[in-house]
Image (cartoon, helix red, strand yellow):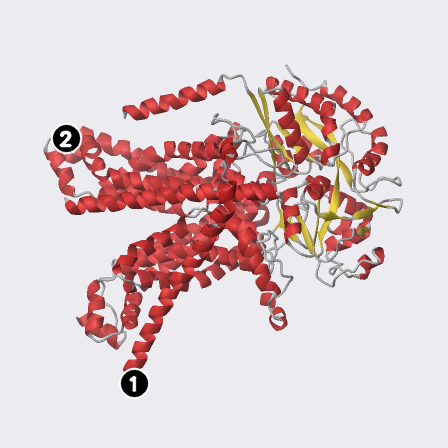
Amino acid sequence: MKLKTRPDEILFRVGTGVFGVIVIAAVLAIGWQLGWESRLSIREFGWQFWRTEIWDPVAGQFGARPFIWGTLYSSVLALLIATPVALGIAVYISELCPGWLQRPLVFLTELLAAIPSIVYGLWGMFVLVPFVRHLETGTPEWMRALPLFSGPPLGIGMLAAAIILSIMVIPFTSSIAREVLRAVPQAQREGAYALGATKWEAIRMALFYARTGIVGAVMLGFGRALGETMAVTMVIGNTPRVSASLFAPQYTMAAVIANEFTEAGDDLHLHALIEIGLVLFVMTLIINIISRAFIWSLGHQDRPRRRRGVLAQQTESV
Amino acid sequence: MKKVVYGALGIAALMGVTLAAQKVQINGGGATFPNPIYTKWFSEYNKLHPNVEINYQSQGSGFGIQQIIKRTVFFGATDGPMTQDQLLSAPGKIVHFPTVLGADVPVYNIPGVSQELKFSGPLLADIFLGKVTKWNDPAITKLNPGVNLPGSDIVVVHRSEGSGTTYIWVDYLSKVSPEWKKRVGVANSVSWPVGVGAKGNESVAGQVIQVPGSIGYVELIYALQNKIAYGSVQNMNGKFVKANVNSVTAAAASAAKQMPADFRVSITNAPGDDVYPISSFTWMLLYENAPDKAKAKVMVDFMKWALTDGQKYAGDLGYAPLPKAVVDMEMKTLATIKVQ
Amino acid sequence: MRNTWRRFLSQGIVVLCAGAVLLALVPLALVLFYVVAQGISSLNWAFFTHMPAPVGEVGGGMANAILGSLMVTGLAALGAIPIGVTAGIYAAEYRGTRVASAIRFAADTLNGVPSIVVGVFAYTVAVLPFHRFSALAGGCALGIMMLPLVVRTTEELLLLVPNTLREGALALGATRARAVFTVVVPAALPGIVTGVLLALARVSGETAPLLFTAFNNAFFTTDPRQPIATLTVQVYTYAIAPYQDWHRQAWAGALVLVTIVLTCSLLARFATARMERMQRGS
């Protein structure tokens, strides 16, 4: 009897398959529930929801622009700080450091990822914020005049949130970048060295080879930053405002849900909050898909490549 | 495999034993305004009746109102009375019970200033509207001659979530500032023109302590327990009064005579020389006809204790006890709560 | 000339990368230092055995919160482990099929869902219909967060088991179920256990999903249908309050959290290292 049609095989397949379907159903259920429970807000405000700045529960006016601004601004800032550091770490661990140092360093970076976000929030509130306030009070007058640094030196605000987020994103991006760099065939590196490349030139070649994977790693870090709640809400100031200033207290999508959810006055308020949650869900979903596609494509670079630089050409022919 | 099964059975047995211990656990939540005295009450009541555990979580009045409507908590607590719409949206009749009297005070943190500041109603409205932005603004210095106020920015701290403490504050501001009434209005959660949001009375107090130049509003006890400076406010009769048990009790005196049957009344900006103008009742919310009659009976018994013996804890914690006339009215209303 | 510049640049980059490592280690050291320094003095017997004191009074502890965290994480595991492991088995054994790819995709998606969104979802399905906040609802939320980690770990480890083992078992006449459960899974078990341990450590540190599911409780309770205090939510509540005593306890709670997470991580590292040594030896 063929394996495929044996009764015990079918039983096994269906039996385990059911649990697999549960996992799939969970994702669908979350998407569905979020969409269903935000219908009032979607119907009422449509696309205007994302362009209006007024968030006024009293008047029943809900505009989510400050939250999406705060989320994107803080996440982009975090990326700007975290990406060079994370890539530097990834490069160091996978290419440069002595062998005995590899495992301890990997362990330490994973420790960064393991610290619960509430602990980061606690540390952020009592250690980082006073430090940032100190920094802000010390900014020279001419910088204060710029919109980027305007406003009273509170300590809490966009800058503190960006710093905390970047600390939390670094281990994510760096561990995936490390994996991605490991996938670069050793032959590529050896070829480069054979041609007389310096360490940096070989690394540059590896980074270039793995560029789609690196982009994927950065995007995953971005997705992580988008959804972070606790650490951000404890240091960002929780004020719905669109402001370019690093010193200004602002608000993110995740933070407003955490603060206002349990006492959303009327159904419209609640649905507006859930709509924000829905969009957050969709954003992270899209970023996840794209970044995994990038990382996956790295392992499948079989197609012939077009001419690029001399070095790349020469390494290809090796 | 066997170990797993026995382990699971063991846990189930343990849970069963605890369930059978005849304990009554009641969950409630809401206002942060009365949190210190409520937690004191529930702790003392638990000492008197060890099998009654009333779990109160202070998450803001908005939470208290919403979750009692959704029936995820057995009782709610709020300092902003429910609106007619909210009452109608509930699956049953909800009754308001005043429990204590308290006050919102303007707390501030100005480095170098240790004296007590005087505020008028319109001045507070202007600060929270963002019209007065520096501590040495003439409007402030006029009321406080002799105080060396710096030229630094005023940082306004308000609540980030739905709050009865906010309700009391904006209710008062609406009465003394027509501009506030028009621009912002009165509710548990408003659209603040300026300022930084903090969650709960606790967090507003925390922010004011940490941020130099800030001003916020908290229930009196939070200012007292954390030794934050708070100012006096000018009342309707023109006198500058600081919040304390006496000035808050004075505010309730006139209201007691005209208490509506459902106890929903505002006593901000009440007339009288000794009155502190930002005082308020705070209420507990109970269903008249809750499905769980055993819990309803426990809550009624607790309320009777809180309205009589419990009142003696009020003074130490900076709250004012209820006027006797109000307590008498409440006892009668308590009888309407169905306990079987 | 050009060679010296290239070599100089290369050295410079090496230094920068090493600098990046040090830069990242600075906040790690600072966070751990502050948590230990601020929290260690408050870790007394009272902290582990007492309930929270009434607001404003000094003293009290987090006994109920510590038990609560254990309970909620345990409930999460109770749901996530059976479902996750079995789903992972399917994804590994039927690799390449559409369902398996869908499972992997779903797991990756779940992994990326922000924790607050999971909390909102759990509130709508586990709190509202039952009209109560409960430890079970909290367990549901954390379980959803654990699921993808368990699925992926199981799948990856089962894929590492050589096919010869499977074929051997089947050749000896075992049913598919028997082959998988008595031969393949035990071969991958140490790794699966490690992965589960890491997943447990990760979710025990979550706060946002518990805010509106398990909620909080001033009393000690073992009833899963009641709201329950958890270490993470308690630390949050205390941190944003003004009371100095609460801040002190918040640091202590953070120290306990970090210790648990670090211990689990170390154990997992240790186990993985031992396994690799065993595999290399065989």
Q: Is residue A42 visible?
A: no
Residue C91: x %, y % from top left: 27, 41
Question: Which residue position is annotated with label 2?
Answer: C174
The image shows a total of numbered marks equal to 2
Quarter of the view holding residue C168: top left
Residue B160: x %, y % from top left: 63, 47
Q: Is residue A176 above or below residue A207?
A: above
Relative side of B311 to C279, left or right = right
Quarter of the view holding residue B101: top right
Question: CB under 8 Å between callouts 1 and 2?
Answer: no
Quadrant where the C terminus of chain A lies? bottom left
Residue B292, numbered label: none
Residue C1, numbered label: 1
Quadrant where the N terminus of chain A lies? top left
Tell me the amino acid under the disc marked 2.
Answer: Ala
- Identified at 62% across, 61% down, the residue is A153
Residue at the extreme bottom: C1
Relative side of A266 to C63, left or right = right
- SS at circle 1: loop
Q: Is residue B326 visible?
A: yes
Tag 1 subunit: C
Q: Is residue B25 above or below residue A29?
A: above
Residue B92: x %, y % from top left: 65, 25
